[in-house]
Image: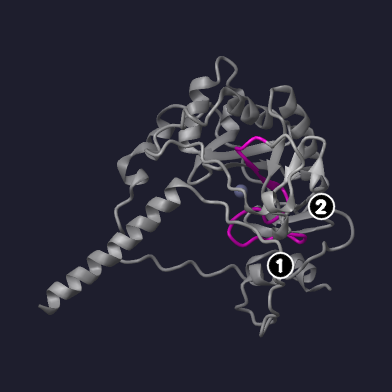
Amino acid sequence: MRAAARLLAVLILAAAFSAIAQEKHMIDPTPPGSLNPEPLPPLQNPDAPSTPAKELFARKRTPFPGPPRSIGGYSDGCLAGATQLPHNGSSWQVMRPSRNRNWGNPHLVHFIERFAKNAKKVGWRGLLVGDMSQPRGELSGHTSHQVGLDVDIWFAPMPDHVQSREEREFSSATDVVAPNLLDVDPEVWTHTHTELIRTAAQDPAVTRIFVNAAIKKALCREAGADRDWLSKVRPWYGHAEHFHVRIACPADSAECKPQPPPDPGDGCGHELDFWFEESTLHPPPPLIPPKPKPALTLAGLPPACKQIVKAP
Ligand SMILES: [Zn+2]
């Protein structure tokens, strides 16, 4: 009897983990913002070595002064001398302004301005800009976006009016992947989406773009003869409501840790198979729940980041 109860408990747990895994695979939904964001409560013990770095960086509302510097790696770094992307531009609008994540290295801001203009030329009315970085970098809810060189762009086209604060905080993003995860949703996806991503990838500053594997599959099909840009577009989990654009370490950020260039080739062959295997789309529940990864602390970041986050 006890064994049966234990088995039942294991099965329930397994089902719960399976549901989480599937959800994570499908989309990484954009959480709603807020009209009156509450300031974070002060940390009890900010100097403890175990304090997660993200807790310290999330409490900095202003950039570190001085020249712009992206310091460290995309997933273990920080940012000094950040600039803020204005909430409205000639052809972009910042979404979820309450998150205060429209900060970046000035090279990223210039890229977004340039990309918005070029996107217009291929028929995209304007960009809805999601998360960039916080004023000093590091970002909870993302493993990268830490050095001010990453930006999420929504797949939904910009409305034909300047959006109200309510629209920016609460309107939901558009999932362009079909419910079976095997391809894009033909009801939502258009060829202009392909041209939009091609335009971003062809910008010389861009080093990688992350999209859901179903989107990569559609791009491979629609790219035509000109395919060099496809090597920068990498399949990844989630990224069904937005695509993630990463620019290379700027020459004037000597402390920035570059990534090796993506593999050459269009990435449209057998490299894609893994993403559409049953075990990837619907992973079996783990027998033992995975241990959560310990949070990154200041010890895991370049020493300059400590100075940057501790400065007033
Ligand atoms: Zn991102």
Give the labeled residue for mark 1: 57
Q: Is residue 287 visible?
A: no
- 89 lies above or below 187: below
Residue 75, numbered label: none
* The residue stretch that appears in magenta: 134-157
Q: Residue flagged by tag 1: what amino acid is it?
A: Phe
- 59 lies above or below 274: below
Do residues under tags 2 and 1 come within 8 Å of each other at their CB atoms? no
- Say which quarter of the image contains residue 203: top right
Q: SS of the residue at dot 2?
A: strand
Q: Position of residue 173 (x, y in %)?
A: 58, 45
Single out the mark in the foreground, 2 or 1. 2
Residue 84, numbered label: 2
Q: Position of residue 238 (x, y in %)?
A: 49, 46
- Measure how far apart labels 2 and 1 are at the Cα level: 16 Å
Q: Position of residue 232 (x, y in %)?
A: 60, 33
